[in-house]
Amino acid sequence: MSDNILTDVKAKAEKWLNSNIDEQSKKEIKNLLSGNDKNLIESFYKDLEFGTGGLRGIMGVGSNRINIYTIGMATQGLCNYLKKQFANKKISIAIAHDSRNNSRLFAETTANIFSANNIKVYLFDSLRPTPELSFAIRELSCQSGIVITASHNPKEYNGYKVYWDDGAQIITPHDKNIINEVKDITSINKINFKANNNLIIPIGEKIDKKYIKNIKSLSLSPQAIKRNNNISIVYTPIHGTGVNLVPISLKEFGFTNINTVEEQCITDGNFPTVKSPNPEEKATLKMAINKAIDINADIVMATDPDGDRVGIAVKNTNNEFQILNGNQTGAILIYYFLTKWKEKNKLKGKEYIVKTIVTTELLIDIAKKFDVESFDVLTGFKYIANIIKQNEGKKHFIVGGEESYGYLAGEFVRDKDAVMACSLIAEVTAWAKDNNKTLFELLLDIYNEFGFYKESLISVVKKGKEGEEEIKTMMDKYRNTPPDSINDSDVVLIHDFFKQKTFDQISQLRYDINLPKSNVIQYILQDGSKITIRPSGTEPKIKFYFSVKDNLDNKNNFEQVDKKLNEKIENIVKSLGIK
Protein backbone atom coordinates (compact mmCIF):
# COMPACT_ATOMS: atom_id res chain seq x y z
CA MET A 1 0.00 0.00 0.00
CA SER A 2 1.37 3.40 -0.99
CA ASP A 3 1.90 5.91 1.85
CA ASN A 4 0.72 8.63 -0.55
CA ILE A 5 -2.60 6.87 -1.13
CA LEU A 6 -3.19 6.49 2.60
CA THR A 7 -2.27 10.14 3.21
CA ASP A 8 -4.65 11.32 0.48
CA VAL A 9 -7.43 9.08 1.73
CA LYS A 10 -7.09 10.34 5.30
CA ALA A 11 -7.14 13.93 4.07
CA LYS A 12 -10.36 13.28 2.13
CA ALA A 13 -11.94 11.57 5.13
CA GLU A 14 -11.04 14.56 7.32
CA LYS A 15 -12.60 16.90 4.75
CA TRP A 16 -15.84 14.94 4.97
CA LEU A 17 -15.60 14.93 8.75
CA ASN A 18 -15.42 18.74 8.77
CA SER A 19 -18.32 19.28 6.36
CA ASN A 20 -22.05 19.61 7.05
CA ILE A 21 -22.77 15.88 7.41
CA ASP A 22 -24.89 14.21 10.08
CA GLU A 23 -23.47 12.99 13.39
CA GLN A 24 -23.91 9.28 12.58
CA SER A 25 -21.84 9.67 9.41
CA LYS A 26 -19.14 11.51 11.38
CA LYS A 27 -19.05 8.68 13.89
CA GLU A 28 -18.63 6.10 11.11
CA ILE A 29 -15.78 8.10 9.53
CA LYS A 30 -14.00 8.34 12.89
CA ASN A 31 -14.30 4.55 13.23
CA LEU A 32 -12.77 4.12 9.76
CA LEU A 33 -9.89 6.49 10.61
CA SER A 34 -9.09 4.53 13.74
CA GLY A 35 -9.61 1.08 12.24
CA ASN A 36 -8.54 -1.02 9.25
CA ASP A 37 -6.68 1.06 6.64
CA LYS A 38 -8.04 -1.15 3.83
CA ASN A 39 -11.65 -0.33 4.74
CA LEU A 40 -10.78 3.37 4.91
CA ILE A 41 -9.12 3.24 1.50
CA GLU A 42 -12.02 1.36 -0.12
CA SER A 43 -14.43 3.98 1.24
CA PHE A 44 -12.42 7.06 0.20
CA TYR A 45 -9.72 6.20 -2.37
CA LYS A 46 -11.82 7.76 -5.13
CA ASP A 47 -15.10 9.55 -5.70
CA LEU A 48 -17.87 7.15 -6.64
CA GLU A 49 -17.93 7.66 -10.37
CA PHE A 50 -21.00 9.23 -11.88
CA GLY A 51 -20.90 7.07 -14.98
CA THR A 52 -22.77 7.37 -18.24
CA GLY A 53 -26.00 6.21 -16.56
CA GLY A 54 -25.60 7.43 -12.99
CA LEU A 55 -24.24 5.88 -9.80
CA ARG A 56 -24.04 2.33 -8.48
CA GLY A 57 -22.05 1.07 -5.54
CA ILE A 58 -21.93 -0.37 -2.05
CA MET A 59 -23.90 1.57 0.56
CA GLY A 60 -21.98 3.20 3.37
CA VAL A 61 -20.16 6.32 4.42
CA GLY A 62 -17.45 7.77 2.18
CA SER A 63 -16.83 9.28 -1.24
CA ASN A 64 -16.70 5.83 -2.89
CA ARG A 65 -19.97 4.66 -1.37
CA ILE A 66 -23.68 5.21 -2.01
CA ASN A 67 -25.08 7.53 0.65
CA ILE A 68 -27.22 10.67 0.85
CA TYR A 69 -24.15 12.83 0.19
CA THR A 70 -22.83 11.11 -2.93
CA ILE A 71 -26.42 10.97 -4.20
CA GLY A 72 -26.79 14.61 -3.13
CA MET A 73 -23.75 15.67 -5.18
CA ALA A 74 -25.10 13.83 -8.22
CA THR A 75 -28.51 15.43 -7.79
CA GLN A 76 -27.14 18.95 -7.33
CA GLY A 77 -25.01 18.55 -10.45
CA LEU A 78 -28.04 17.30 -12.40
CA CYS A 79 -30.11 20.25 -11.11
CA ASN A 80 -27.49 22.67 -12.39
CA TYR A 81 -27.40 20.97 -15.78
CA LEU A 82 -31.19 20.90 -16.16
CA LYS A 83 -31.36 24.62 -15.43
CA LYS A 84 -28.87 25.30 -18.21
CA GLN A 85 -30.62 22.99 -20.67
CA PHE A 86 -34.13 24.26 -19.96
CA ALA A 87 -33.34 27.84 -18.97
CA ASN A 88 -36.68 29.30 -20.10
CA LYS A 89 -38.91 26.43 -19.07
CA LYS A 90 -40.51 25.17 -15.88
CA ILE A 91 -38.65 21.97 -15.11
CA SER A 92 -40.22 18.82 -13.67
CA ILE A 93 -38.78 15.44 -12.82
CA ALA A 94 -40.20 12.02 -11.87
CA ILE A 95 -38.64 9.83 -9.18
CA ALA A 96 -39.16 6.13 -8.42
CA HIS A 97 -37.37 3.58 -6.27
CA ASP A 98 -37.11 -0.16 -5.69
CA SER A 99 -37.28 -2.29 -2.52
CA ARG A 100 -33.64 -2.02 -1.50
CA ASN A 101 -32.49 -0.87 1.91
CA ASN A 102 -32.41 2.96 2.01
CA SER A 103 -34.10 3.29 -1.39
CA ARG A 104 -37.00 5.35 0.02
CA LEU A 105 -34.57 7.54 1.97
CA PHE A 106 -32.46 8.14 -1.13
CA ALA A 107 -35.58 8.87 -3.25
CA GLU A 108 -36.90 11.38 -0.72
CA THR A 109 -33.46 12.99 -0.36
CA THR A 110 -33.28 13.34 -4.14
CA ALA A 111 -36.78 14.86 -4.23
CA ASN A 112 -35.83 17.34 -1.49
CA ILE A 113 -32.78 18.56 -3.38
CA PHE A 114 -34.67 19.01 -6.66
CA SER A 115 -37.43 20.93 -4.89
CA ALA A 116 -34.82 23.05 -3.08
CA ASN A 117 -33.55 24.00 -6.53
CA ASN A 118 -37.06 25.07 -7.61
CA ILE A 119 -37.68 21.96 -9.73
CA LYS A 120 -41.10 20.28 -9.58
CA VAL A 121 -40.95 16.66 -8.44
CA TYR A 122 -43.38 13.82 -9.13
CA LEU A 123 -42.48 11.25 -6.47
CA PHE A 124 -44.05 7.79 -6.55
CA ASP A 125 -45.84 7.10 -3.26
CA SER A 126 -44.09 3.72 -2.85
CA LEU A 127 -41.84 1.34 -4.74
CA ARG A 128 -42.44 1.01 -8.51
CA PRO A 129 -40.79 -0.87 -11.40
CA THR A 130 -38.11 1.01 -13.33
CA PRO A 131 -40.04 0.82 -16.64
CA GLU A 132 -42.99 2.63 -15.05
CA LEU A 133 -40.63 5.50 -14.24
CA SER A 134 -39.76 5.65 -17.95
CA PHE A 135 -43.47 5.69 -18.79
CA ALA A 136 -44.21 8.39 -16.20
CA ILE A 137 -41.56 10.76 -17.59
CA ARG A 138 -43.28 10.70 -20.98
CA GLU A 139 -46.80 10.72 -19.56
CA LEU A 140 -46.12 13.73 -17.31
CA SER A 141 -43.92 15.58 -19.85
CA CYS A 142 -40.96 15.68 -17.48
CA GLN A 143 -37.50 16.84 -18.49
CA SER A 144 -35.75 14.10 -16.55
CA GLY A 145 -36.25 11.19 -14.19
CA ILE A 146 -34.45 9.28 -11.46
CA VAL A 147 -34.86 5.73 -10.25
CA ILE A 148 -33.13 4.57 -7.09
CA THR A 149 -32.08 0.97 -7.73
CA ALA A 150 -29.12 -1.35 -8.07
CA SER A 151 -31.14 -3.75 -10.22
CA HIS A 152 -30.08 -7.35 -9.43
CA ASN A 153 -26.88 -6.53 -7.51
CA PRO A 154 -26.31 -8.02 -4.03
CA LYS A 155 -28.12 -6.46 -1.07
CA GLU A 156 -25.14 -4.27 -0.09
CA TYR A 157 -25.58 -2.20 -3.27
CA ASN A 158 -27.79 0.64 -4.32
CA GLY A 159 -27.79 3.02 -7.25
CA TYR A 160 -29.09 6.12 -8.99
CA LYS A 161 -30.13 5.99 -12.66
CA VAL A 162 -30.78 9.14 -14.67
CA TYR A 163 -33.34 9.42 -17.48
CA TRP A 164 -33.95 12.17 -20.03
CA ASP A 165 -37.18 13.68 -21.37
CA ASP A 166 -37.72 10.85 -23.88
CA GLY A 167 -38.01 8.36 -21.01
CA ALA A 168 -34.67 6.72 -21.81
CA GLN A 169 -31.48 6.56 -19.80
CA ILE A 170 -29.12 9.41 -20.64
CA ILE A 171 -26.65 9.09 -23.50
CA THR A 172 -24.21 11.43 -25.26
CA PRO A 173 -24.03 14.40 -24.98
CA HIS A 174 -26.10 14.64 -21.80
CA ASP A 175 -24.23 11.90 -19.94
CA LYS A 176 -20.82 13.56 -20.29
CA ASN A 177 -22.21 17.04 -19.66
CA ILE A 178 -23.93 15.90 -16.45
CA ILE A 179 -20.72 14.16 -15.34
CA ASN A 180 -18.88 17.49 -15.69
CA GLU A 181 -21.55 19.29 -13.65
CA VAL A 182 -21.37 16.63 -10.93
CA LYS A 183 -17.57 16.97 -10.81
CA ASP A 184 -18.04 20.68 -10.09
CA ILE A 185 -19.82 19.80 -6.83
CA THR A 186 -16.53 19.52 -4.97
CA SER A 187 -17.98 19.88 -1.49
CA ILE A 188 -20.96 18.50 0.38
CA ASN A 189 -21.63 22.08 1.46
CA LYS A 190 -22.57 22.91 -2.16
CA ILE A 191 -25.68 20.70 -1.95
CA ASN A 192 -29.00 22.44 -1.26
CA PHE A 193 -30.94 20.04 0.98
CA LYS A 194 -33.65 22.53 2.07
CA ALA A 195 -36.80 21.01 0.57
CA ASN A 196 -39.73 22.98 -0.79
CA ASN A 197 -42.53 20.53 -0.01
CA ASN A 198 -44.99 22.49 -2.18
CA LEU A 199 -43.03 21.31 -5.23
CA ILE A 200 -43.11 17.59 -4.30
CA ILE A 201 -46.23 15.91 -5.72
CA PRO A 202 -47.01 12.27 -4.88
CA ILE A 203 -48.07 10.03 -7.78
CA GLY A 204 -49.19 6.41 -7.91
CA GLU A 205 -52.40 4.61 -8.83
CA LYS A 206 -53.43 6.95 -11.67
CA ILE A 207 -50.11 6.37 -13.47
CA ASP A 208 -50.33 2.63 -12.72
CA LYS A 209 -53.67 2.36 -14.54
CA LYS A 210 -52.45 4.26 -17.62
CA TYR A 211 -49.27 2.18 -17.73
CA ILE A 212 -51.16 -1.13 -17.53
CA LYS A 213 -53.66 0.07 -20.16
CA ASN A 214 -50.81 0.74 -22.58
CA ILE A 215 -49.29 -2.69 -21.93
CA LYS A 216 -52.68 -4.32 -22.57
CA SER A 217 -52.82 -2.55 -25.97
CA LEU A 218 -49.87 -4.73 -27.12
CA SER A 219 -51.88 -7.94 -26.95
CA LEU A 220 -52.04 -9.73 -30.30
CA SER A 221 -53.93 -12.95 -29.45
CA PRO A 222 -56.85 -12.11 -27.14
CA GLN A 223 -58.88 -15.06 -28.44
CA ALA A 224 -56.05 -17.50 -27.76
CA ILE A 225 -55.87 -16.16 -24.20
CA LYS A 226 -59.63 -16.51 -23.83
CA ARG A 227 -59.43 -20.17 -24.85
CA ASN A 228 -56.40 -20.83 -22.59
CA ASN A 229 -56.87 -18.32 -19.78
CA ASN A 230 -56.34 -21.00 -17.14
CA ILE A 231 -52.74 -21.84 -18.02
CA SER A 232 -51.00 -22.18 -14.67
CA ILE A 233 -48.48 -19.39 -14.02
CA VAL A 234 -46.11 -19.25 -11.05
CA TYR A 235 -44.72 -15.75 -10.45
CA THR A 236 -42.18 -14.36 -8.01
CA PRO A 237 -41.08 -10.71 -7.64
CA ILE A 238 -38.01 -11.83 -5.60
CA HIS A 239 -38.93 -9.32 -2.87
CA GLY A 240 -39.04 -6.49 -5.41
CA THR A 241 -41.19 -4.02 -7.30
CA GLY A 242 -43.09 -6.40 -9.57
CA VAL A 243 -45.16 -7.62 -6.63
CA ASN A 244 -48.34 -5.69 -7.47
CA LEU A 245 -48.19 -4.73 -11.13
CA VAL A 246 -47.16 -8.04 -12.73
CA PRO A 247 -50.22 -9.94 -11.35
CA ILE A 248 -52.46 -6.96 -12.22
CA SER A 249 -51.15 -6.89 -15.80
CA LEU A 250 -51.58 -10.66 -16.19
CA LYS A 251 -55.18 -10.39 -14.99
CA GLU A 252 -55.83 -7.50 -17.40
CA PHE A 253 -54.66 -9.72 -20.24
CA GLY A 254 -57.21 -12.29 -19.11
CA PHE A 255 -55.16 -14.87 -17.22
CA THR A 256 -56.95 -16.38 -14.23
CA ASN A 257 -54.56 -18.95 -12.76
CA ILE A 258 -51.74 -16.82 -11.31
CA ASN A 259 -49.86 -18.34 -8.38
CA THR A 260 -47.37 -16.15 -6.50
CA VAL A 261 -44.51 -17.32 -4.29
CA GLU A 262 -45.83 -15.71 -1.11
CA GLU A 263 -42.53 -15.81 0.81
CA GLN A 264 -40.93 -13.74 -1.97
CA CYS A 265 -43.83 -11.28 -2.25
CA ILE A 266 -42.59 -9.61 0.94
CA THR A 267 -40.70 -6.48 -0.13
CA ASP A 268 -37.37 -6.73 1.65
CA GLY A 269 -34.04 -5.18 0.65
CA ASN A 270 -32.18 -8.01 2.38
CA PHE A 271 -33.65 -10.51 -0.13
CA PRO A 272 -33.85 -13.13 2.65
CA THR A 273 -34.89 -16.14 0.55
CA VAL A 274 -32.14 -15.91 -2.10
CA LYS A 275 -28.38 -15.61 -2.23
CA SER A 276 -28.72 -13.16 -5.11
CA PRO A 277 -31.89 -11.45 -6.45
CA ASN A 278 -30.81 -12.13 -10.02
CA PRO A 279 -33.34 -14.06 -12.17
CA GLU A 280 -30.47 -15.21 -14.40
CA GLU A 281 -29.29 -17.51 -11.60
CA LYS A 282 -30.83 -20.95 -11.22
CA ALA A 283 -30.79 -20.88 -7.41
CA THR A 284 -32.85 -17.68 -7.40
CA LEU A 285 -35.73 -19.44 -9.17
CA LYS A 286 -35.61 -22.54 -6.95
CA MET A 287 -38.62 -21.68 -4.74
CA ALA A 288 -40.73 -20.73 -7.75
CA ILE A 289 -39.81 -23.89 -9.66
CA ASN A 290 -40.55 -26.06 -6.60
CA LYS A 291 -43.99 -24.47 -6.37
CA ALA A 292 -44.52 -25.01 -10.11
CA ILE A 293 -43.67 -28.70 -9.70
CA ASP A 294 -46.09 -29.00 -6.76
CA ILE A 295 -49.04 -27.50 -8.65
CA ASN A 296 -48.06 -28.78 -12.13
CA ALA A 297 -47.76 -25.26 -13.54
CA ASP A 298 -47.10 -24.41 -17.18
CA ILE A 299 -44.61 -21.60 -16.72
CA VAL A 300 -42.48 -19.87 -14.07
CA MET A 301 -41.69 -16.15 -14.13
CA ALA A 302 -39.30 -14.22 -11.88
CA THR A 303 -38.65 -10.47 -12.05
CA ASP A 304 -35.62 -8.73 -10.58
CA PRO A 305 -35.94 -6.17 -7.74
CA ASP A 306 -36.56 -3.14 -9.97
CA GLY A 307 -38.89 -4.99 -12.34
CA ASP A 308 -37.09 -4.46 -15.63
CA ARG A 309 -35.83 -8.02 -16.28
CA VAL A 310 -37.61 -11.37 -16.21
CA GLY A 311 -36.36 -14.93 -16.09
CA ILE A 312 -38.62 -17.81 -17.06
CA ALA A 313 -38.68 -21.58 -16.72
CA VAL A 314 -40.79 -23.96 -18.83
CA LYS A 315 -41.27 -27.70 -19.14
CA ASN A 316 -38.90 -29.33 -21.61
CA THR A 317 -39.51 -32.50 -23.61
CA ASN A 318 -38.76 -34.57 -20.51
CA ASN A 319 -41.51 -32.67 -18.63
CA GLU A 320 -38.88 -31.09 -16.37
CA PHE A 321 -38.67 -27.37 -15.71
CA GLN A 322 -35.83 -25.77 -17.63
CA ILE A 323 -34.72 -22.16 -17.29
CA LEU A 324 -34.56 -20.38 -20.63
CA ASN A 325 -31.73 -17.94 -21.14
CA GLY A 326 -32.35 -14.38 -22.28
CA ASN A 327 -31.51 -15.16 -25.89
CA GLN A 328 -34.05 -17.97 -26.02
CA THR A 329 -36.84 -15.88 -24.51
CA GLY A 330 -35.97 -12.99 -26.82
CA ALA A 331 -36.10 -15.29 -29.86
CA ILE A 332 -39.52 -16.60 -28.84
CA LEU A 333 -40.92 -13.10 -28.35
CA ILE A 334 -39.57 -11.75 -31.62
CA TYR A 335 -40.70 -14.81 -33.58
CA TYR A 336 -44.18 -14.46 -32.06
CA PHE A 337 -44.49 -10.73 -32.73
CA LEU A 338 -43.31 -10.94 -36.33
CA THR A 339 -45.54 -13.96 -37.01
CA LYS A 340 -48.62 -12.18 -35.63
CA TRP A 341 -47.82 -8.87 -37.34
CA LYS A 342 -47.53 -10.69 -40.65
CA GLU A 343 -50.82 -12.52 -40.05
CA LYS A 344 -52.53 -9.20 -39.33
CA ASN A 345 -50.97 -7.53 -42.42
CA LYS A 346 -49.21 -5.00 -40.21
CA LEU A 347 -45.80 -5.39 -41.88
CA LYS A 348 -45.61 -2.45 -44.31
CA GLY A 349 -41.84 -2.32 -44.87
CA LYS A 350 -40.98 0.30 -42.24
CA GLU A 351 -40.87 -1.97 -39.19
CA TYR A 352 -37.74 -2.96 -37.29
CA ILE A 353 -36.34 -4.81 -34.29
CA VAL A 354 -33.27 -3.97 -32.16
CA LYS A 355 -30.78 -6.14 -30.27
CA THR A 356 -27.41 -5.61 -28.62
CA ILE A 357 -24.06 -6.81 -29.97
CA VAL A 358 -23.80 -9.55 -27.31
CA THR A 359 -27.29 -10.89 -28.03
CA THR A 360 -27.87 -13.92 -30.26
CA GLU A 361 -27.65 -13.56 -34.04
CA LEU A 362 -30.76 -15.76 -34.17
CA LEU A 363 -32.84 -12.60 -33.79
CA ILE A 364 -31.31 -11.21 -37.00
CA ASP A 365 -32.10 -14.45 -38.84
CA ILE A 366 -35.73 -14.34 -37.71
CA ALA A 367 -36.09 -10.69 -38.78
CA LYS A 368 -34.65 -11.50 -42.22
CA LYS A 369 -37.28 -14.19 -42.79
CA PHE A 370 -40.03 -11.61 -42.30
CA ASP A 371 -38.17 -8.89 -44.28
CA VAL A 372 -38.01 -6.78 -41.13
CA GLU A 373 -35.05 -4.45 -40.59
CA SER A 374 -32.79 -5.10 -37.60
CA PHE A 375 -30.36 -2.92 -35.69
CA ASP A 376 -27.35 -3.95 -33.59
CA VAL A 377 -26.38 -1.62 -30.74
CA LEU A 378 -23.94 -1.54 -27.85
CA THR A 379 -24.82 -3.30 -24.60
CA GLY A 380 -27.33 -1.26 -22.65
CA PHE A 381 -31.00 -0.64 -23.26
CA LYS A 382 -30.41 3.10 -23.58
CA TYR A 383 -28.94 2.38 -27.02
CA ILE A 384 -32.08 0.47 -28.04
CA ALA A 385 -34.11 3.45 -26.81
CA ASN A 386 -31.95 5.79 -28.86
CA ILE A 387 -32.69 3.85 -32.06
CA ILE A 388 -36.40 4.19 -31.27
CA LYS A 389 -35.95 7.95 -30.77
CA GLN A 390 -33.99 8.36 -34.02
CA ASN A 391 -36.67 6.54 -36.01
CA GLU A 392 -39.69 8.09 -34.32
CA GLY A 393 -42.27 9.10 -36.92
CA LYS A 394 -40.27 7.46 -39.73
CA LYS A 395 -40.20 3.75 -38.88
CA HIS A 396 -42.11 1.51 -36.49
CA PHE A 397 -40.35 -0.29 -33.62
CA ILE A 398 -41.94 -3.69 -33.00
CA VAL A 399 -39.87 -5.40 -30.33
CA GLY A 400 -36.31 -5.62 -29.06
CA GLY A 401 -34.19 -7.21 -26.41
CA GLU A 402 -30.86 -8.08 -24.89
CA GLU A 403 -29.43 -11.36 -23.65
CA SER A 404 -29.54 -10.26 -20.01
CA TYR A 405 -33.29 -10.92 -19.74
CA GLY A 406 -34.44 -7.47 -20.93
CA TYR A 407 -37.26 -7.02 -23.48
CA LEU A 408 -39.44 -4.23 -24.81
CA ALA A 409 -42.36 -3.92 -27.23
CA GLY A 410 -44.06 -0.73 -28.36
CA GLU A 411 -42.78 2.82 -27.96
CA PHE A 412 -44.50 4.15 -24.81
CA VAL A 413 -41.72 2.83 -22.52
CA ARG A 414 -38.07 3.42 -23.37
CA ASP A 415 -36.38 0.84 -21.17
CA LYS A 416 -36.56 -2.91 -20.72
CA ASP A 417 -39.85 -3.84 -19.10
CA ALA A 418 -40.48 -7.02 -17.13
CA VAL A 419 -44.09 -6.13 -16.30
CA MET A 420 -44.81 -5.96 -20.02
CA ALA A 421 -42.66 -9.00 -20.80
CA CYS A 422 -44.42 -11.24 -18.25
CA SER A 423 -47.81 -10.59 -19.84
CA LEU A 424 -46.49 -11.03 -23.38
CA ILE A 425 -44.64 -14.26 -22.52
CA ALA A 426 -47.83 -15.59 -20.93
CA GLU A 427 -49.67 -14.64 -24.13
CA VAL A 428 -47.15 -16.54 -26.28
CA THR A 429 -47.64 -19.55 -23.98
CA ALA A 430 -51.41 -19.37 -24.56
CA TRP A 431 -50.88 -18.96 -28.32
CA ALA A 432 -48.53 -21.96 -28.42
CA LYS A 433 -51.06 -24.02 -26.47
CA ASP A 434 -53.72 -22.96 -28.99
CA ASN A 435 -51.43 -24.57 -31.58
CA ASN A 436 -51.00 -27.72 -29.46
CA LYS A 437 -47.45 -26.80 -28.41
CA THR A 438 -45.62 -25.89 -25.26
CA LEU A 439 -43.35 -22.86 -25.17
CA PHE A 440 -40.34 -25.18 -25.26
CA GLU A 441 -41.66 -26.95 -28.35
CA LEU A 442 -42.08 -23.55 -30.00
CA LEU A 443 -38.41 -22.87 -29.25
CA LEU A 444 -37.44 -26.18 -30.87
CA ASP A 445 -39.44 -25.21 -33.95
CA ILE A 446 -37.43 -21.98 -34.14
CA TYR A 447 -34.12 -23.88 -33.80
CA ASN A 448 -35.24 -26.36 -36.43
CA GLU A 449 -35.97 -23.58 -38.89
CA PHE A 450 -33.12 -21.15 -38.22
CA GLY A 451 -30.38 -23.25 -36.61
CA PHE A 452 -29.55 -24.11 -33.01
CA TYR A 453 -27.82 -21.10 -31.49
CA LYS A 454 -26.23 -21.71 -28.10
CA GLU A 455 -25.03 -18.85 -25.90
CA SER A 456 -23.23 -18.75 -22.59
CA LEU A 457 -21.84 -16.12 -20.25
CA ILE A 458 -18.99 -16.27 -17.76
CA SER A 459 -18.49 -13.39 -15.35
CA VAL A 460 -15.13 -13.17 -13.56
CA VAL A 461 -15.41 -11.07 -10.39
CA LYS A 462 -12.52 -8.73 -9.55
CA LYS A 463 -13.36 -6.58 -6.53
CA GLY A 464 -11.93 -3.31 -5.27
CA LYS A 465 -9.07 -1.17 -6.50
CA GLU A 466 -6.83 -4.16 -7.29
CA GLY A 467 -9.67 -5.78 -9.22
CA GLU A 468 -10.15 -2.68 -11.37
CA GLU A 469 -6.48 -2.72 -12.31
CA GLU A 470 -6.56 -6.45 -13.07
CA ILE A 471 -9.58 -6.05 -15.37
CA LYS A 472 -7.79 -3.22 -17.20
CA THR A 473 -4.72 -5.44 -17.70
CA MET A 474 -6.89 -8.26 -19.05
CA MET A 475 -8.65 -5.97 -21.53
CA ASP A 476 -5.30 -4.54 -22.70
CA LYS A 477 -4.06 -8.08 -23.34
CA TYR A 478 -7.13 -9.14 -25.36
CA ARG A 479 -6.98 -5.89 -27.34
CA ASN A 480 -3.24 -5.61 -28.03
CA THR A 481 -2.20 -9.27 -28.30
CA PRO A 482 -5.27 -11.11 -29.65
CA PRO A 483 -5.02 -14.88 -30.28
CA ASP A 484 -4.56 -16.15 -33.85
CA SER A 485 -6.94 -19.03 -33.20
CA ILE A 486 -9.34 -20.18 -30.47
CA ASN A 487 -10.32 -23.84 -30.05
CA ASP A 488 -8.48 -24.69 -33.31
CA SER A 489 -10.55 -22.21 -35.30
CA ASP A 490 -8.87 -19.13 -36.78
CA VAL A 491 -9.87 -15.67 -35.57
CA VAL A 492 -11.05 -14.06 -38.81
CA LEU A 493 -12.50 -10.78 -37.53
CA ILE A 494 -11.76 -8.63 -34.50
CA HIS A 495 -14.29 -5.96 -33.64
CA ASP A 496 -12.69 -3.40 -31.32
CA PHE A 497 -15.52 -1.15 -30.17
CA PHE A 498 -13.12 1.10 -28.25
CA LYS A 499 -11.00 1.82 -31.32
CA GLN A 500 -14.23 1.72 -33.37
CA LYS A 501 -12.52 -0.51 -35.92
CA THR A 502 -13.01 -3.99 -37.35
CA PHE A 503 -9.78 -5.81 -38.20
CA ASP A 504 -10.09 -8.42 -40.94
CA GLN A 505 -7.37 -10.95 -40.11
CA ILE A 506 -7.50 -12.53 -43.58
CA SER A 507 -7.42 -9.48 -45.86
CA GLN A 508 -5.64 -7.32 -43.25
CA LEU A 509 -8.15 -4.55 -44.05
CA ARG A 510 -9.76 -2.27 -41.47
CA TYR A 511 -13.35 -1.09 -41.36
CA ASP A 512 -15.06 1.59 -39.30
CA ILE A 513 -17.60 0.63 -36.63
CA ASN A 514 -20.40 3.19 -36.61
CA LEU A 515 -21.26 2.85 -32.95
CA PRO A 516 -20.24 4.92 -29.91
CA LYS A 517 -16.88 4.11 -28.36
CA SER A 518 -17.07 1.29 -25.82
CA ASN A 519 -14.54 -0.93 -24.07
CA VAL A 520 -15.56 -4.14 -25.85
CA ILE A 521 -13.58 -6.69 -27.87
CA GLN A 522 -15.31 -9.23 -30.10
CA TYR A 523 -13.66 -12.18 -31.87
CA ILE A 524 -15.41 -13.88 -34.81
CA LEU A 525 -14.01 -17.34 -35.59
CA GLN A 526 -13.85 -19.15 -38.90
CA ASP A 527 -16.41 -21.71 -37.69
CA GLY A 528 -18.93 -18.92 -36.96
CA SER A 529 -18.40 -18.80 -33.20
CA LYS A 530 -18.53 -15.38 -31.54
CA ILE A 531 -16.69 -14.37 -28.35
CA THR A 532 -17.29 -10.98 -26.76
CA ILE A 533 -15.28 -9.57 -23.84
CA ARG A 534 -16.24 -6.48 -21.84
CA PRO A 535 -15.95 -5.12 -18.31
CA SER A 536 -19.31 -4.72 -16.61
CA GLY A 537 -20.47 -1.13 -16.40
CA THR A 538 -22.28 -1.69 -13.10
CA GLU A 539 -20.44 -4.47 -11.24
CA PRO A 540 -16.79 -5.41 -10.45
CA LYS A 541 -16.70 -8.02 -13.21
CA ILE A 542 -15.23 -8.79 -16.59
CA LYS A 543 -17.74 -10.63 -18.79
CA PHE A 544 -17.13 -13.23 -21.48
CA TYR A 545 -20.00 -13.95 -23.89
CA PHE A 546 -19.93 -17.05 -26.11
CA SER A 547 -22.13 -17.90 -29.08
CA VAL A 548 -21.89 -21.10 -31.13
CA LYS A 549 -24.23 -22.69 -33.68
CA ASP A 550 -25.17 -26.02 -35.23
CA ASN A 551 -28.08 -27.48 -37.19
CA LEU A 552 -31.06 -29.11 -35.48
CA ASP A 553 -32.53 -31.12 -38.35
CA ASN A 554 -34.47 -33.37 -36.00
CA LYS A 555 -36.06 -31.90 -32.88
CA ASN A 556 -35.62 -35.26 -31.13
CA ASN A 557 -31.85 -34.64 -31.28
CA PHE A 558 -32.06 -31.49 -29.14
CA GLU A 559 -30.21 -32.92 -26.14
CA GLN A 560 -27.49 -34.43 -28.32
CA VAL A 561 -26.81 -31.17 -30.19
CA ASP A 562 -27.11 -29.18 -26.96
CA LYS A 563 -24.40 -31.34 -25.38
CA LYS A 564 -22.18 -30.93 -28.44
CA LEU A 565 -22.50 -27.13 -28.32
CA ASN A 566 -21.89 -27.04 -24.57
CA GLU A 567 -18.66 -28.98 -25.10
CA LYS A 568 -17.64 -26.54 -27.81
CA ILE A 569 -18.13 -23.60 -25.44
CA GLU A 570 -16.15 -25.41 -22.73
CA ASN A 571 -13.28 -25.92 -25.16
CA ILE A 572 -13.34 -22.23 -26.15
CA VAL A 573 -13.18 -21.27 -22.46
CA LYS A 574 -10.18 -23.59 -21.95
CA SER A 575 -8.49 -22.25 -25.08
CA LEU A 576 -8.79 -18.68 -23.75
CA GLY A 577 -7.52 -19.73 -20.31
CA ILE A 578 -10.44 -18.14 -18.45
CA LYS A 579 -10.50 -18.84 -14.73
Image: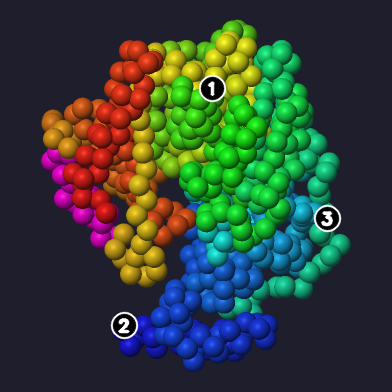
Q: Position of residue 486 (x, y in %)?
A: 17, 39
Which is the main secondary structure of the residues drawn in magenta? helix
Residues at marks 2 and 3, CA–CA distance in whole angstroms: 49 Å
Label 2, on which residue? 1
Residue 531, percent across and down? Answer: 29, 39
Q: Is residue 485 magenta?
A: yes
State which mark lies toward you, 2 or 1.
Answer: 1
Instruction: Look at the image and give the residue range highlighted in magenta.
Output: 472-486
Q: Is residue 500 left or right of residue 420?
A: left
Vertical side of 121 occupied by 4: above or below: below
Q: Nearer the viewer, mark 1 or mark 3?
A: 1
Res 450 quadrant in image: top left
The C terminus: image quadrant = bottom left
The numbered mark, 1 or 3, whose residue comes first in the sequence reads: 3
Q: Amino acid at mark 2?
A: Met
Q: How is the model colour-coded? A: rainbow
Secondary structure beneath label 2: loop
**Residue 282 appears anywhere in the view:** yes
Name the residue located 65 percent from the left edge and 64 percent from the top edge: 101
